[in-house]
Image (tube, rainbow, N blue to C red):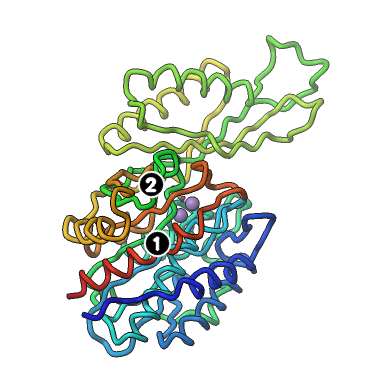
Amino acid sequence: MPPIAINPERLIQDLHELRRFGTSGNGVIRPAYSDADIAAREWLAARMAQAGLTAVFDPVGNLFGLPPGDGKCLLSGSHSDSQPEGGWLDGAYGVIAALEVARASLEAGGPPVAAVSFQDEEGRFGPLTGSRIWSGALSLAEADSLSDLSGLSFAEARRSMAALSQPDFVSADRFTGFIEAHIEQGPVLDSHNEAIGVVESIVGIRSELFRFSGQQNHAGTTPMALRRDAFQGLIRFADTLNARFADVVTPATVWTIGHVSVHPNAESIVPGRVDFTVQWRDGDDARLDRMADIIHATAEEVAQETDLEVERSNYSGIGATTMDERLRAGIASAARDLAPEKWRQMPSGALHDAANVSRLMPVAMIFVPSIGGVSHDFAEDTAEAHLVLGAEVLAASASALAG
Ligand code: HGY
Ligand code: MN
Ligand code: MN
């Protein structure tokens, strides 16, 4: 197979083009189904068509760029939606790297490569919604009943792309495997002055929405002993949880109370209600189960002790995933050639669409460094040379694995 020679200038130019959609300071605000997200996907579909790929939106807005013919091919890509405050490269890098490799391969008469941008990887409606639906982990009916934190339903949100979407999902039978290039979003490569990460595994993730309800009241006239303060309940819950996790977790385990909404969130009113998310991640699914039991028991106990009601909803989870041996070895060999002494095998603490796609086909991932290890922040960035090198490793892997 002729090697696929990517066009570095075109890769960088398309990354900056994509950055224009929802641009905010150094980063982007491009949540799933926002105007910026849909405009970005329409731009991407046009770029795919210009590259000779057939652009196809599926019923939930996942966007595929399919090479000519109907033979089997490698699939590569990631997501182009962002966190509420996102970096310009999270997901976008893997989508544009896949487009560039698919395009360059077509130009060189090389192996056919398909590109994809999955929808709502960043979990506006739940973790990695688009690839969970495509991979069969979540039914469309279940997904349609999900809602975002403002109460908008997934069904309502995806209706905004109905005119673009075709009625059927793209069949996974078309693909031999999936390789996702992504920024590391952590400090390892950057702090070791390395350029390429060959991912071995992706952690599992669980998340759930909680509500403590107490009694809204006057902040001046309500004695402390008579209060049913929902926010105080949350503080006690978080404190107790940290203590109880001590003998269950390892230094690699993480848990986050990332979203908190205090009601009515006013200086002179005792909070009667607090909604909050708990998200936990680890490489061992059994440990995630044990943590779930502790979380649920602690929430019930704290509610009882503080005379609050507790409700739970939106529970979702994705299991820990091991990368495919053959694909990973192909990437490692390309990294050895293109980044000698500057690459390593490593786990992923971030979730990626590859975790869901692994239900359907062999998957593997390529990391490039995040400067200062920063991500999910407008300041997220990666050196241009690393962006180009990662795409070259993807191209070399695609060539070798297509053979
Ligand atoms: O949170 C994650 O791991 C991913 O960036 N959505
Ligand atoms: Mn991502
Ligand atoms: Mn992300």
Q: Which residue is mark 2?
A: 194
Q: Is residue 105 above or below residue 93?
A: below
Q: Which mark is residue 261?
A: none
Q: Nearer the viewer, residue 113 or 150?
A: 113
Provide the secondary structure element on which disc 1 rests.
helix
Q: Residues within 10 Å of mark 1 (few under 14, many from 20)?
A: some
Residue 65 horizontal/vertical position (percent): 40, 79
Residue 10 horizontal/vertical position (percent): 50, 75
Residue at 45 percent across and 22 percent down: it is: 241
Q: Quadrant of residue 51?
A: bottom left
Q: Which residue is mark 1?
A: 389
Provide the secondary structure element on which disc 2 rests.
loop
Query: Earlier along the polypeptide chain: callout 1 or callout 2?
Result: 2
Q: Is residue 290 above or below residue 232?
A: below
Residue 166 appears in the picture as rendered: yes
CA gap, disc 1 to disc 2? 12 Å
Q: Residues within 10 Å of mark 2 (few under 14, many from 20)?
A: some
Residue 166 horizontal/vertical position (percent): 44, 82
Q: Quadrant of residue 177?
A: bottom left
Q: Nearer the viewer, residue 343 or 67?
A: 343
Q: Amino acid at mark 2?
A: Glu
Q: Amino acid at mark 1?
A: Leu
**Residue extending farthest front:** 340
Q: Is residue 206 left or right of residue 256?
A: left
Residue at 68 percent across and 9 percent down: it is: 225
Residue at 55 percent across and 60 percent down: it is: 153
Residue at 53 percent across and 54 percent down: it is: 124
Residue 59 appears in the picture as rendered: no
